[in-house]
Every structure is written in C-alpha cells, then in structure tokens.
Amino acid sequence: MLDSEQSPELRAIDLDALRSYRYDRVQRELRANACAAALLSDPVNIRYATDSRNMTVWLLHNQGRYCVVPAEGQAVLFEYPNENCLIAQPQLLAVGERRLARCYEYQYAAEHGKVLSQLWAAEIAEVVGALMGRGEHRVAVDGGDLLGYEALQRAGLVAVEGQPIMEIARSIKSAEEIACMRNAIDVTELGMQRMHDALRPGITENQLWAELHYVNIALGGEWIETRLLSAGPRTNPWFQESSDRRIQSGELVCFDTDLVGPHGYCADISRTFHCGPQKPTSYQRELYRFAVEQIAHNCELLRPGCTFREYRDKAWQIPDRFRRQCYGSILHGVGMVDEWPGIDWDRNEPYAQDGVLMPGMTVCVESYIGEFGGGEGVKLEEQVLITETGHDVMSHFPLESSLM
C-alpha cells in the first residue's frame, strides 16, 4: 500500500479556468480555419475540449462516443448509447446538451451499417445547423471511416481534416495545464522510485512495471500508453515490451513511462537503472554517458523562437556506431498524450516538420544509445516546458549514480 507520507502533495487545479481555456483554444482554431464546428471522436480530443471522459481506452478502438463543438456556443456531447451514461456524467461548462450516440460500425450494425451511418450523419447535420444556422458548413473531423465520411457528404456537410486543428489548439499550455502536468510527473516519479526500490535480481520485468501502474491508479491517474520496460539483452534493440523474464544482477533496466496521470495529463519520462549487487561494466557506463550527453545538449537548445529545422541542425551528433538503432525522434510534443511537433534526428529527412518553439509548449527530449548487434542499450528522456526566456526541465528523477 501507499504510505500517506510517500504521496506527493498534488497542486490544486482551478477546473473552471482549465476548461474555459481549452474550449476557447478549440473554438478559436475552428474560426481561424473557417469551420462551423468540430466533430470529435478521439477520446483525448473530447476530453481536451469538454473535460468529459468515459471508458477512454475502450473508446480508443470502438465507436460509441463523439462530440460536436461549434465555433460559437456550447457543445453537444453524444454519450455511449446507454441511458445510464446520460445520468451519470457531471455538468460541464462546455456542454449544452447530451444525447445518446448512434453507432454504425460493423460490430454493432453488421449489414445495416450504411443505413445507420446515414441516420448518424443526418443527426450531425441537424445539430450543426441548429447551432450555426442554415448553409453549407465545413466540419473539422478528427477521425472516422469511409462509411461515415461518405454519409457526412450526403448529409450536406463538408468534412475537412480536424486533427491538425486540435493539435495546434492543444500545443500551447495554460498555467493550469502545466500544474496538471506537474502533478502527473510527481505521481510518475513516485512510481519510478518504487520501481527503483523494488529492483532486485529475480524480479520479473512485469512485476517491476506493475509498481508504476499501481501508484498511478492509486493517486487518481488514468492509464499507461505502452509497456516499454526491458532488461539485460532485451534492452537492445529498443521497443521491446515487458515480459515475465527475471532480471539478473548486473543488468541494465530501461523503461519509458508514457503515463496518463491525474486530470488526463501525460508524464513521458525514460530512465535506465542498474540492477545490483554486481557493479556496472565500463561498456554500460560508456553507453550511459553518451545518452546523458545527448539529452543535456539537446535540452540546452530549447528556447522560444527556435525553429524546428534550427533545432535539428544544432542537435547532438549521434555517433555512427549508434545511428542504425537510434531513437527516431529527438524531440516530440506532449500534453494529454504525445502531440505535435515531432522532430527527427535525420537532417536529410525530406518530410521534416517545420515550425517554431513557443512559450507554453511542453516537449520531451529523447535518447536511445545501443549498437546494432551489440549487447545492452540505454534509454533516457526528459519532459521540458518552453518558457518566455528559455526552458524548464519538469522531470526531476535523478540519473543512475552507479552509471555516471
């Protein structure tokens, strides 16, 4: 169990300010893109716009909940099609009306999908018209399928790509969002400390990983996006999920938290531990030194006004021996989950993103150091706020002293 003395003192959140800021961000982006409304089905986007959630992970891969956010006025939220879901949800500033969702995907509708998709789209068109008046309306859609897209067209709506609008809206964080993120990091780092304390020869990767899940749920967090924890030879290459393999003395243990904590905000931090009592090897320390250098160098580059291309050009030069298996992204945005932008290490990437770092952006700086065909590897990652004058490293969990 969690000792009350261990639990972090989480910051109080002004929920009205948090919700108003985010809803205004969405509506401003809709107006800037000449859209009458957004049709949101991604649970993360619905949460951002309205602060409403229900069965989030299940609804990431099932139809059953969506929301119409007009460019002016309150949203209409379509709840999972059970009357209890209309009763159980709290009152929210952004939501003016709740209805039951209409589902047409195959598991619900089978051969009736086309007919039901047309009824679904007709109701969406009716809602948009009631909110925004008569006319041909552009609607920003953040996901969907061919059946739904065709039905929206037949209903007289002009569907446009909605995810860029939501990514831009979500990219600049308010003070309340930053406080939410700091709470998520505090919860995560308590979980990381429990992992560090529990690490011993013979514990399985899954047992170690469970410590992080336990702390997150016990302190009001929501879910963990991945299960990226591996030890010993399984640290190379990276992106191996935790298993029932028992960790041995002398091995490195790498993990990436990818944790969605209290109020739905992400703490995306990576560390590499060393399992004693056997001492680290000189090769393990060398790998760790390179990863620390990469993170430190790339964090120092972070400042408002820096373009993505400038950042990429000045980033730490990955030694040739590690390039084949290096982490593809040297920096990515983070908020409720991983977000825009994504900056790749490859200076010759023809589809490299361009843009500018701005105050209020929160980003993660990544490193993976491991040789192709080599032994172990090292994973590190820090979460950073872009400030008016530079940057603030938000993650504070100490580096592994035995590897320094």
Image (spheres, grey):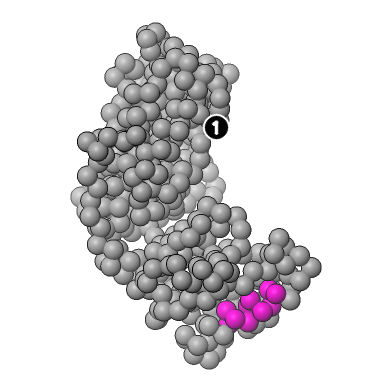
The secondary element bearing badge 1 is classed as loop
For the stretch drawn in magenta, the main secondary structure is helix
Which residues lie in the magenta part? 116-125
Image: 357 above or below 289: below
In magenta stretch: residue 175: no
Residue 209 in percent (x, y) is at 45, 31
Tell me which residue sits at (30%, 52%) in the image.
Answer: 180
| Near-viewer residue (373 or 152) | 152
Q: Is residue 130 visible?
A: yes
* Tag 1 residue: 241
Q: How many marks?
A: 1
Residue 315 in percent (x, y) is at 38, 37
**Quadrant including the N terminus:** top left
| Left or right: where 241 falls relative to 97 | right
User: Which residue type does callout 1 highlight?
Assistant: Glu
| Left or right: where 125 falls relative to 277 | right
